[in-house]
Amino acid sequence: MRTQVAIIGAGPAGLLLSHLLAGAGVVSVVLEARSRGYVESRIRAGILEDSTVRLLESAGLGDRLKAEGDPHRGIYLNWPGERHHLDFVDLVGRNVWIYGQTEVQKDLGRARDADGQEIHYEVADVRLNACESDRPYVTFTDRDGRPQRLDADAVAGCDGSFGPSRAAIPDSAKRTWSRTYPHSWLGILADVPPSTDELIYAWHPDGFALHSMRSATVSRLYLQVPNGTDLSDWPDRRIWDALATRLGHGDGWTLNPGPITDRSVLPMRSLVTAPMRHGRLFLAGDSAHIVPPTGAKGLNLAVADVALLAPALTALVKDRNPGPADDYSDTALRRVWRCTHFSWWMTTMLHTGGDEFDAQLQLSQLRWVAGSTAGATGLAENYAGLPIGFGAERAGRARAQFGARGRQ
Ligand code: RFL
Ligand code: PHB
């Protein structure tokens, strides 16, 4: 097989990339290890930034999102005895949208069907070859067990945190920074109307809790739990009691419990790999970086990477102009590090670890964020999202000043 861009992974990054490339007249083939049903039902992100929504709309993917998604003006910050609303629209003029990643994934799948996109699901043994040359190729075993070879002008590694693309960059050519946190999230999906109009992020001595939602009838909630937590130690009653305690603020507010339809424990980590390019291999989304979910940034970062990568690959393979592809990693990493810091900051501000001094610092910081326009604006600017092109101008300036040595 031969194509212009071989895309590994049919998650949001891979499918959106194939969609944007097709719109620019570039042909791609997508390889995915899982089945389509599995990929479309994975319960993950729920918050879309303003710039993500604008990009999806401009790519013709916004109709259902605008009809069924729920715009939110901001979030609540909560700690015992207090609840404060941060209004992002008042603070920075942008809002966020509640629209599940499952729905984004389905919209992308339908749009790619309509275009006749070639996607191979349930492939195995994906290997990246000759990425340092102008003729990279990917080998894999198709769902019928036949060995295949896909030749391409470029390879896009959109295969998430455990895929083969990041590992295909030799250690001598990359650097990785990471942080493992001492806690995980116990996440539930429940068939019950949300007990709040907007998300509640709660600090509590027992640990962090988050009240999110998927629709007027489905709630999504999370509890901070220690790493290694066994779900069997958390019967429904214990989950709802812990959520009610941590999310309460002592002013008569109550949490409506309901039937739990999905539950899982999610470890939290931060990771950044640089550069996000090696020869003709380009990384996008979770294959290059992972953030803890406290800042709601993972899916949005994947979309922002792809918004830069699609025009860069178009220029490279269609116009034979390598400039934007050469800039891709530096530019993308500006935003990646900003979101990595924001996600780390939200995580360390809201998760408790039993240290009394840390707890007082966290409360002081929360009071400052909730009580000062400067503090609230900083959170709002980062949470509601930076513009898609964030960093492009600065990355260009650093290069002009420092040449190749200025690159990360
Ligand atoms: P994905 O979605 O992991 O897709 C990668 C795809 O690659 C496939 N793959 C392979 N294919 C072929 N060969 C192989 N060897 C392969 N290995 C893997 C995988 O099967 C998969 O289909 O990565 P992508 O596209 O970069 O998208 C990233 C997002 O999915 C992720 O960042 C978000 O879900 C993170 N996240 C959130 N992000 C937000 O922006 N807002 C949120 O509110 C938010 N909440 C969350 C989250 C992630 C969570 N979990 C479970 C990690 C909440 C949770 C609970
Ligand atoms: C979610 O709805 O799944 C969600 C919302 C906000 C976060 C993380 C997850 O920070």
Image (cartoon, rainbow, N blue to C red):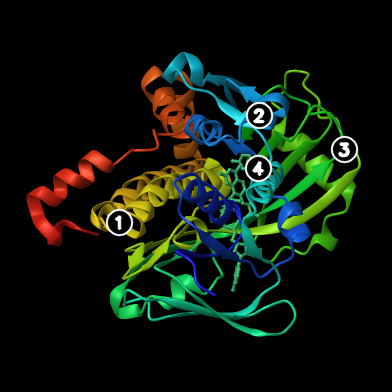
Disc 2 or 4, which lies upstream in sequence? Answer: 2
Residue 199, relative to residue 344: is it above or below?
A: above
Callout 4 crowding tier (Cα within 10 Å): few <14, some 14–19, many ≥20: many
Image point (41%, 28%), residue name = 381
Residue 104, which numbered label? 4
The three-letter amino acid code for the residue at tag 4 is: Val
* Relative depth, front residue between 385 and 111: 111
Q: Is residue 250 visible?
A: yes
How far apart in space, not on screen, are marks 3 and 1 (Cα)? 45 Å
At horizontal 42% and vertical 64% (from top left) the residue drawn is: 178
Residue extending furthest toward the left: 401
Residue assigned mark 3:
191
Crowd rating for badge 3 (residues with CA inside 10 Å; few <14, some 14–19, many 20+) = some
- Discs 1/4, front: 1
Q: Which mark is residue 178?
A: none
Q: Is residue 251 left or right of residue 315?
A: right
Q: Which mark is residue 63?
A: 2
Q: x and y percent of residue 403 in the render?
A: 10, 57
CA gap, disc 1 to disc 4? Answer: 26 Å
Which mark is first along the chain, 2 or 1?
Answer: 2
Q: Nearer the viewer, residue 215 or 358?
A: 215
In the figure, is residue 223 to the left or right of 309? right
Q: Which residue is mark 1?
A: 325
Ligand 2 falls in which quarter?
top right
Tag 1, which secondary structure? Answer: helix
Q: Quadrant of residue 294?
A: top right
Q: Residue at x 76, y 53 (%)?
A: 41
Amino acid type at mark 2: Asp
